[in-house]
Amino acid sequence: MGNKIMNNKKERTSKLIDLSEAISSINDKDRIAIGGFAIYQRPMASVREIIRQKIKNLTVIGVTNSIDTDILIGAGCLKRIESSYIGFENYGMAKNFRKSSEKGNIEVVDYPELISFDRFRASQENLSFWPSAGLGGTDIVKLNKEIKQFNCPLSGKILHAIPAAKPDVVIIHALAADKYGNVITPSFRNISQSLDITLSRACEKVIVTVEKIVSTNFLKRHPQLVEIPSHRVTSVSIAPFGAHPTSMLGRYLDDQEYWERYIDLSDNETIFKKHLNDYIYNLKDNNDYLNLIGGAKLSSLITVDTQI
Amino acid sequence: MNNTEYTLNELLVVNLYKDFKNGEVGFTGLATGKYPSLYITSIPLVAMELARKTHAPDLTILLAGWIQNPDLSKFNKVPDAELAEYLRDIPCESQMTSYPGQYPLRRGSISFGFGTGVQIDKIGNINSVCIGKHDAPKVRLVGPILLPEHFSMFGREYIMMPYHEKRTFVNHVDYIAGVGYPGGLEGRKKLGLESGGPELVFTPKAIFDFDKKLGTIKIRSMHPGTTKKEILESTDFELPNLDNNVRQSDIPTKEELKLIREEIDPKGIFLNS
């Protein structure tokens, strides 16, 4: 018995694969959770690859969403969005989202912001729902048949059962990982990064892109920063500036020029289609995209932080 | 501008800050657009700082849900993006960066907040989701965001409406994102809403409060220069107490103006935008 094992020693499995291969594991009609928060640190290289592979009829489950969702809607990849906010903060309204929902082309399920987060906590805890107080009288519960009112079995108070997020796939963009999928989250964090950690615990298919692959020895200098360990990660792919045009905390700022251009071009269907062709369909991968954005532009976005 | 002249923004600030109590925690978020941002971020920040410099030194300003007691003098623009890098670098007493759980919102740790929407109705419901029916609406907006929590989990909510018009002051909102007083306080209890709810409504023309027992909005004061006719023409619901006894909104004192202009907002970043 022992000898048999000794004769069959295996190498540890590398989870490092091309982004196109990683994204090809996403199916039409999947429920997808997109890392980041509002206009910050969205896994945009993965989003662009989803568009390139023409994956359709997806449902996005989010907390607050922005260009990650708007561009998927504009590219016809989405049939439904469950979120508390779809907008571009200081940059204004998400126009593809707005037009599609006004035409009735996508289904919009509104959830309050904290409760949108609770839905992932429910998934993390493997519960079918999360209990919530304070929703009575809102149109959120009136219009959503999946939310059920019940009385707290202990106090008798009125509560609502909020369905768990139940993503089929989670995509996140992080600073660095080793090839086994141990992901580093720098110590200065914000909502985006804490949410990413929760998302990684709420689903069995977790697709990660990183700025840099680092050695396991480097990573062992910072084990307390690895809150997304290898066994939670399905695959890891290299995608430098993979959050562009959104920002990555302590690494690069958002590309204001791109955002402003996007706001204009998402106003017009023909111009938006051309944009998708130029920036996604006619390009092979993230490297082509970075070349198109340009080295000088990307360099100008780099920022520094003293904390890791 | 001499010592006794004042702006509308300053008038709103001095009518707001008197309502805050020492030791409270005030939550202000961010909004998209110049006027919503002025009404739910700038005016509340200046009002809370004025309270801290006068009767409420222990009041906590919670900005954008993660920054506590920021140094307002260090801002070069009104904060307009919740997690922008420049906010990280504003000196403050505390940055809470895990989410949620950075503040026990649902235990009632927020005393008051500020909210706005495209519509408010006569029982204080607010709408930030859509105009028209929900599926294929006439206008789709950003979504409920944190408003449901504002109107049920905060101690009270100040509704800040930069546009006071018939299209924004309606009989029934098209989508209830934040719940007012359906059936008054008793009605709220039946819905499981045991605390919170709208407290005051601020507009460029007037200030409103609520008969919380009946669950109806009423006028509290009109700003100097506003006429009853103007209120009637810009409000789509009836205001039974709009009579000759409506008092005037408080006018800023010299001392209040001096603090606002010289100490709190010397660069005019918040109120002159």
Image: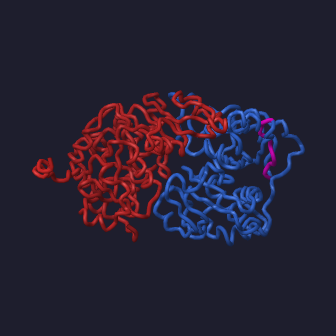
Chain colours: A red, B blue
**What x and y, as percent, mark residue A145?**
53, 27
Q: Give B86 or B61, whichever is nearer the viewer.
A: B61
Residue occupying image coordinates x 53% and y 56% = B80
Query: In the rendered image, which quarter contains the C terminus of chain B?
Result: bottom right
Q: Is residue A45 magenta?
A: no
Residue A169 lies left or right of residue B36; in this view the side is left
Which segment did they paint magenta?
B214-223
When asked about the image quadrant of residue B51, the answer is bottom right
Q: Is residue B216 magenta?
A: yes
B16 shown above or below A161: below
Residue occupying image coordinates x 69% and y 63% = B59
**What x and y, as percent, mark residue B98?**
49, 57
Q: Give B260 or A81, whichever is nearer the viewer.
A: A81
The secondary structure that most of the magenta stretch takes on is: strand
Q: Residue A171: tell me if it is visible.
A: yes
Task: State the residue lying farthest toward the front.
Answer: A1
Residue occupying image coordinates x 38% and y 48% = A200
**What x and y, as percent, mark residue B154?**
66, 49
Residue occupying image coordinates x 22% and y 45% = A283
When asked about the image quadrant of residue B10, the answer is bottom right
Q: Give A3 or B32, whichever is nearer the viewer.
A: A3
Query: In the rendered image, which quarter contains the N terminus of chain B?
Result: bottom right
B173 shown above or below B10: above
**What x and y, as percent, mark residue B234?**
72, 39
Q: Residue B236: tell me if it is visible.
A: no
Task: State the residue lying farthest toward the right.
Answer: B245
A21 shown above or below B18: above
Count of numbered tags: 0
